[in-house]
Image: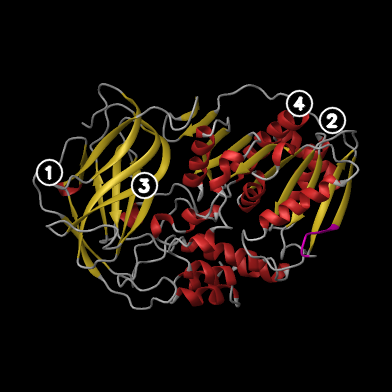
Amino acid sequence: MLPALATRLATAVLSLPPPRTRRVTVTRDIPVRVRDGVPLRTDHYAPGLPDAPTVLIRTPYGRGGPMRLLGRLAAERGQHVVIQSCRGTGGSGGAFDPLVHEREDGLDTLDWLRRQPWWTGAFGMFGASYQGFVQWALAADAGDELRAMVAVVTASGTRDSTYAGESFALDTVLTWAELLQAQTVPWLARQWELKRGQPRLAAALAHLPLAEADRVATGVTVPFFQEWLRHHTPDARYWRNRVFGDRLAEVRAPVAMISGWHDIFLPAQLRDFVALRAAGAAPRLTVGPWTHGSPGLFVAALRDGLDWLDEHLGGHPAPPRAPVRVHVGGAGGGWRELPDWPPPATPAAWHLHPRGRLDTTPPPESDPDGFWYDPADPTPSLGGPLLVAQRAGPVDNRPVEARPDVRTFTSAALAEPVEIVGPVRATVFVRSDLPHLDVFVRLCDVDIRGRSWNVCDGLVRVTPDAFPADATGAARVSVDLWPAAHRFAPGHRLRVQVSGGAHPRYARNPGTGEPLGTAVTLRAGWREILHDPAHPSAVFLPTVHEGPGSSPR
């Protein structure tokens, strides 16, 4: 009775159409054996309706809680729902090795589905984060039987997100490793660790060498964490079976993509959208004011995802909408409907100027701005795209901007609004004592009270080979920031931060060029940011609305 009450409440809260049936039969812990004999524990939610299509969800996060709610909701709308624990998780056999077995296990599960008496020959897939990775692992080989995909805060490949800017997404990877390991400990012990603020994880994020951080966080060595430290540089042999983007053009199913502006996988997911469009597909994209685990994302994914499955599996058309729907942040923003991504926009250059100014005019002759970066006291990360929703998203950046190792460049107050939608990039000319360094760039919206809210950011790891210095010793560093949709209101100011890192979101750069996992020596050094006619450092904003009086005043 309780699950039925939960689905009634969820249907009302989400404003979902009324269910097509209340009769749902649940069979739990079905052992689906794959080609190497490993049993994958699977739950089946069967609707009391004939000729119902199937929705497959494969997950490493267990089959209880939200999965049970989703299973019943989709089943009540007339779909067989199959929820399966990935190998090594949730009671399934074998060992969990991220991404390695998902294609074969997915194909074997599809073969099992074909042998079921209720199989109609059509299925869809649904899921967020890793549950989306497993969709892409199977999608190109599923053929015409796959009729729909709902890919939420996920992408076809994880390599670029793991090594964003060729650094290492330490907070995301280690927090995820700790989360997976926590699923194996008793519930009360886990709650006690969370109540204490996860001190072991905090200690691990600050620990060197990184090759010991997994044991500090979890008490055990996590094999995939060790492998990802060793395979920091692109390695075709290692990553070949762990990324699936090279086969996007073979995917036949309609794809609904849902993400948030502060999601850890957003750049990769938007690249997937562009690749599908280039291949002639017609995916649908929604990007809202969400982080990777925010409640608003969960609600939007359920509502939009169930509608998408209804339309493409059940033949029940959803209300029409534009192919792309994005939420523009900032005062006076809101939802915008677009025909494609990215939309047409003018890449307006906002130049770094002396004395901490930011302006649309080219910089004058000026001396560089310098700061001392010490990896023993790394510049901290604050908000932004993080795995844990409670720490992610827009926050007031004034505490970090007060540090001496962060340089800020701020515009005059705007007379008219400036709205940006699309990719954001920066070019920063940097001179450094050390040949190995990181460049972190963040765009902020400074409100009339002086609070500095992060809009988007990006980091690049600089090496002598990748960024050779010119005759003055300066390296031209191109930084791709997270894409953004934001409206800077009149009276607000634009601000650009430049610093040497954002720890622990990104692993600190030791300044020595030592290997990622074993580095323990930390070298501090002086950095200079150049902003003169020969070195015009700037951030380039995809401006879609800039009134005649919107230049800074």
Q: Please give the residue where the numbered disc 1 appears in the rendered image.
A: 533
Q: Residue 87 is drawn in which quadrant? A: bottom right
Q: Is residue 251 visible?
A: yes
Q: Which residue is mark 2?
A: 20
Residue 289, given in percent of the width and then of the height, sits at 51, 39
Frontmost of labels 4 and 2 is: 4
Residue 253, image x and y in percent? Answer: 66, 36
> As displayed, is residue 41 above or below residue 513?
above
Amino acid type, residue under disc 1 in the picture: Pro
Which residue is the site of mark 3?
480
Residue 261 position in % (x across, y down): 48, 42
Real-space CA distance between mark 3 and mark 2, rounded to the nearest whole angstrom? 47 Å
Please tell me which of labels 4 and 2 falls first in the chain.
Answer: 2
Amino acid, disc 2: Arg
Give the amino acid type for the residue marked by disc 4 in the picture: Gly
* In the image, residue 31 lies in the stretch drawn in magenta: yes
Q: Of label 2 and label 1, which has the lower sequence position?
A: 2
User: From this viewpoint, is residue 262 visible?
Assistant: no
Please indicate whether residue 100 sits to the left or right of residue 334 in the image.
right
Q: Is residue 40 above or below residue 68?
A: below
